[in-house]
Image (cartoon, rainbow, N blue to C red):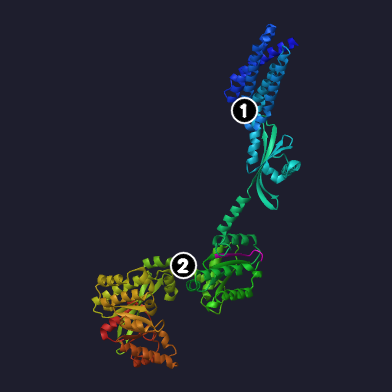
Amino acid sequence: MRKVFIVGNFLTLFLAAAYMVFSARKKSEKFKNFFALCAMVFLCALFQTLNFFASGKAFGIISRCLYLALDVCTVAFIAAFIASIPKFNRMKYCLLGFFALSAIALSAILRRTNFTCNFSSPIYLLIISYIFYTIFFKLDRLILNSMLTLANEKISYAVVCFDEKGKCFYLNRSARAIFGHEKFAYVSAEGYKDKLKRRYSKDMPDFIKLSQSFEIGEEEHKYETEYRIIRDKKNRKICSYLKLTDITKEIALIEQERFRTEHDALTGIYNRNTFFKYAAEILQKNMRTQFLLIATDIMDFKIINSVFGENTSNELLKLSARLISSKKSPNKICGRISGDKFAVLVEKDFFDMKEVQKNNDLLQETVKKFNFIVKNYIGIYEVSDHFENVKTMFDKAMLAIKEIYGDLEKKVAFYDTPLMEKMLSDRQTITQFESSLAKGEFTMFLHPQVDAATSRIMGAEALARWIKPGKGVIAPSQFIPLLEKAGLIHKLDQYIWELAAKKLAEWKASNNEMYISINISVKDFYYGDVYKILTGLVEKYGISPQKLNIEITETVLMQNIDIHRNILQKLHDYGFTIEMDDFGSGYSSLNTLKNLEMNILKIDMDFLKDWDRNKKNRNIIASIISMSKALGMTVVSEGVETKEQAEFLKESGCDIFQGFYFSKPIPVDDFKELYVNRSARNGQY
C-alpha cells in the first residue's frame, strides 16, 4: 500500500506540474485560479512524499497541522476556482468541493490511527484532472451551448435544429409555440422539414426561403421561413436548421399602408390612380367581355358644400360611394376620381338603369330636409378598345355629362363619336390659339351702326374673326366660349383693342369722325389693368377716348360690383363712352344705371323676336327706350333684320340701329370702301 501511495504522489506531482505549465500559458482569470490550485496540490503531494521518506516521528502535531493547513488552502483554492465559473454553470462543480472536504476528513481520521498514507492527494489529482479536462476541452463548449440555448429562448423568431440525419434535437420557445410541446414538437418539426423536402424533385438545396401560414391558438400567423444546411470544409453535412420569423404584424402594417395608398380616405373606395390602374388590368384580362365606363357628377356640389356645410356634403359623398359600390357584379370596381366625381367599371350586362334612378332618389333623401334638389348626372362610355387609356375613357364619359349638365329632366348621357370629334376640335382650338394670334390669323371685323334719323353710319362695333389658312373664317361661337373657359379671352380682347385704336388713328388722320365700340369681358379685369391698358392705347395712338366706346354687359357689372364700377367710373371720367350691352338679357339692375354713368344702352336682340306678334315685347322695348331717354342715354338696338323692325324702333325713339338689315360684320377694308369713303362723299348710308 505504501508503494502505491508513493507512486500516486509522484503521479500527482508530475500531473500537477504539467497542468501548471499548460495553465501558465493562458491569460484568462479562470486559468490563473487553476494554476494556483495546481500549485497547492503540488505542495500537498510534495509534503506527503517527503513524509513517506521521513521517520515516523514526522506524524507529530506539527505535521498534522501542516497537513491540515495545506488541505484547507487547497479546498479554498478549489472554492475560488468554482467561484470564477459563470453562475449558470457553477452548480456542476460544487461536487468537487464535497470530494475535497471528504478527503480532508478521511485523512484526518487516518492520521489519528497513525496511518501514514494520505488520501487527499489522489483525490486532489482527480479533481484537478477533471477541471483540466473541462476547462481545456469541455467547459467553453458547455458555456457556449448554454449561452446559445439561453439566447435562442429569448429571441422572437423560432429556431429548430436538426442533426446530419435530419433528426430534430432542439426547438426554442417560439418554435415550440408553433410545433407544440415535448416529443410531439420534435416529430412535427421533422414532418414540416420533410414537407419542404418533397417540394423538390431532386436534392433539397442548401438554402430555402418562403412564406407560410401557421395557426397558433385560434389565430393565423404568417411566417417567413428559412431552411439552411450547414456543411464543413469538405462539404459534408453537419447539421441544418429552420428559422421562422413571425411577419404577421409587418404584413398587417403593409396592408394598412397599401389600403391608405390605394383608397380614398373619406369614402373608402379606390382613389383616382388605383381605379385607373386596376380598371386597365381588368379590361386587358377580359378582352371578350363588353364593359361600360361610367362617370358620375353631382350638380352644384360646391353650393351644397357652401350652404349646408362640410358634414352634409361629406355624408352625400359617402352615400354616393356606397350606392355605386353596393351592387356587386363580376369585374366591377369603383373609384372616387376627384371632389364629387366618381367612376365605375362594370360589365355591360350588369348595368341597370333602374338602379341609377334609385340611387338618385336616395341621394335626394340626404338633403330633403333642406328643400334642395340633388341631381347626380351619369355619363356612360361603352368600351370599344380594351387597351385605351382608362383616363381617356373617363374623360369621354364626363364629356357626355357636360352635354346634359344643368338639365333637370335628363340624368344619363351616352358618349358618341360626334362628342369626341367636338372635344378634339376644342382642344385643337385652344392649342393653336396663341400661335395663330402671333401669326396674325385673328383680325377685326366691323359691324356698322346706323343713325336712325339720318341713316348715316356713325361708327361700328369691333368683332374678332379667326381666318384660318385653308379653312376660311371661323365663326366666333366656335372659339370665343372656349377662350373664355380656358382663361385666354383677355389676350384676344387686348389684341382687338389695339387694332381698333390703330384704326381710329388712321381715320383721325383722314378726318373721319366715326367711333369704334370694343367689348370687355369679366376675365379682362382679372388678367390685366383695364384702365391702364385702354388709357395707354389712347396715348400711344393719339386718339380721342370719346371715339373708343367701351361695351360692357350686365353680367360683368354684377360680379365684383364695387371694383368694376370704380374702374368704369375712372374710364368714364377719362373721356371714354360707356355702353351697357345686351340690356334685358341678364340682371337688368336699375341700380347699375342709377349708380354708374352710362352713355349708351344697347337693347338685347332677343326682344325683337316675335315683336310683331307679342305686344308685351313691343311695350317692353318702348318702355326701355323711354326710360333711357329720361336718363339722358343714347339707345342702340341690336339684331335689326327687317324694315318693319327698323320703322317700329324709330317710332319708339331708338337712336341707332345695328343689324343684318343694314349690314353684316365685314372686314375693315370693306368697311372703309363701303362706308368711310362713301360717307366722305355724300354722308349717307
Q: Quadrant of the C terminus?
A: bottom left
Front residue of 354/82: it is 82
* Residue 528 at x, y percent in the picture: 34, 68
Q: Residue at x 47, y 67 (%)?
A: 427
Residue in the foreground of this view, choosing between 82 and 504: 82
User: Upstream in the sequence, badge 1 or badge 2?
Assistant: 1
Q: Which stretch is magenta?
A: 329-336
Above or below — where is 431 with respect to 87?
A: below
Residue 135, compared with residue 412, is above or below; it is above
Measuring 59% from the left and 76% from the top, which residue is drawn there? 361
Q: Amino acid at mark 2?
A: Gln
Between residues 164 and 285, which one lies in front from this camera angle?
Answer: 164
Q: Is residue 18 among the parts visible in the rendering?
A: no
**Where does label 1 land, which residue?**
83
| Residue 230 in view (yes/no) | yes
Q: Where is residue 400 shown, x and y percent of the image?
A: 54, 72
Give the image location of residue 134, x and y in percent. 67, 25
Quarter occupied by residue 443? bottom left
Q: Which residue carries the number 2 mark?
A: 428
- Kindly state the secondary structure of the residue where label 1 is placed: helix
